[in-house]
Amino acid sequence: MLAAVITRSGGPEVIEIREVPRPTPGPGEILVRVHASALNRADLLQREGRYPAPSGWPADIPGLEFAGSVEACGNRAWMWQPGQRVIGLVGGGAHAEFLAIHERAVAEIPQPLDWSEAAAIPEAFITAHDALFVQAGLRPAERLFVPAVGSGVGLAAVQLARAAGAECWGTSRTQWKVERAMELGLSGGAAIRDPVVELPSWVEQWTNRKGFDVALDLAGGPYVRAAIEALCHKGRLILVGTVAGGRAEIPIGTVMGKRLTLRGTVMRARPLEERIGAVRSFSAEALPFFARRQLRAVVDSEFALADIAAAHQRLASNATFGKVVLRIPAG
């Protein structure tokens, strides 16, 4: 099969399309013919040698999410039939024509979605759903704050919060991303550069000085402190990303005084059973909304697998709105 292979640490030019052995599904696994796979920041970091794949996943083939059709079923795999369309999350290896995955770790693609739309769902929406409802316990009528709201997870969070009856506000470094996010249900937002200085006045305006119940921090760095200050009494902060920095100043007195909950989360390195649980919960609670077009996967751009270097450049540009998707035709 053809796959995108990281030949060494470096820039986009180190990725080559090569022939590699096709995986064989083990007991309880299915072989999926991948039709599309979206890019994530983790893929860029893995290419640069700064984020190795978890144990048991390909060390040199990136790709964390996919949309494809069931090609074959391994021994004791009975949930799916060849030809069914599925999506899922993996620890790596999705930027290839085929992958093997446990049969319980995939969900069926809603009928109206094409391959690119489906491929834009798993990482963003499953991560956001798990963070908001399983970990933060977001409830109807609560207020949610999301920095980096124009990212894949940010846009998923906006839509999921709206569908659950919560309200969402967000920020971005560019105004046009805020405006486009409002088309998807964002209650309000602002373009800011310094969250510590600029965010407090916006929080007062958006929440009538009450603060947010939940903050989904996709940025890290100074946004952590700003989010803590923006939370209300017994607010919950879920740490998801570090694009603005991997270190933060924590105002401990504020955390204690407000009795806040701070929690970090990752999806890529989770054990199989936890990943299955996240997929099954999302499939039952959120996936039906896509069939009714009440949730929408946002695709920024599409690239052929052979143009993966250009796709990496597009994602690294920070000019994206939604997901960068690779189309993977059969070789």
Image: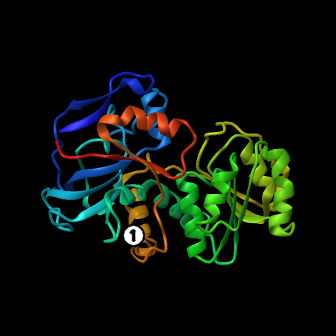
Provide residue 140's location: percent of width, then percent of height: 64, 78
The answer to which of 98 and 74 lies nearer the viewer is: 98
Q: Residue at x 39, y 74 (%)?
A: 291
Please say whether residue 28 is visible from this viewpoint.
no
Identify the image's colour scheme: rainbow, by chain, secondary structure or one colour: rainbow
Q: Which residue is mark 1?
A: 283
Image quarter (top left, top right, bottom left or bottom right) of the C terminus: top left
Q: Quadrant of residue 249?
A: top right
Against 196, residue 52 (above or below) is above
Q: Residue at x 22, y 53 (%)?
A: 32
Provide residue 255's location: percent of width, then percent of height: 79, 54
Provide residue 303's location: percent of width, then percent of height: 36, 43
Asked whether, in this view, residue 304 is left or right of residue 19, the answer is right
The answer to which of 38 and 226 lies nearer the viewer is: 38
Label 1 environment density (alpha carbons within 10 Å; few <14, some 14–19, many ≥20): some
Identity, as a three-letter code, of the amino acid under mark 1: Ser
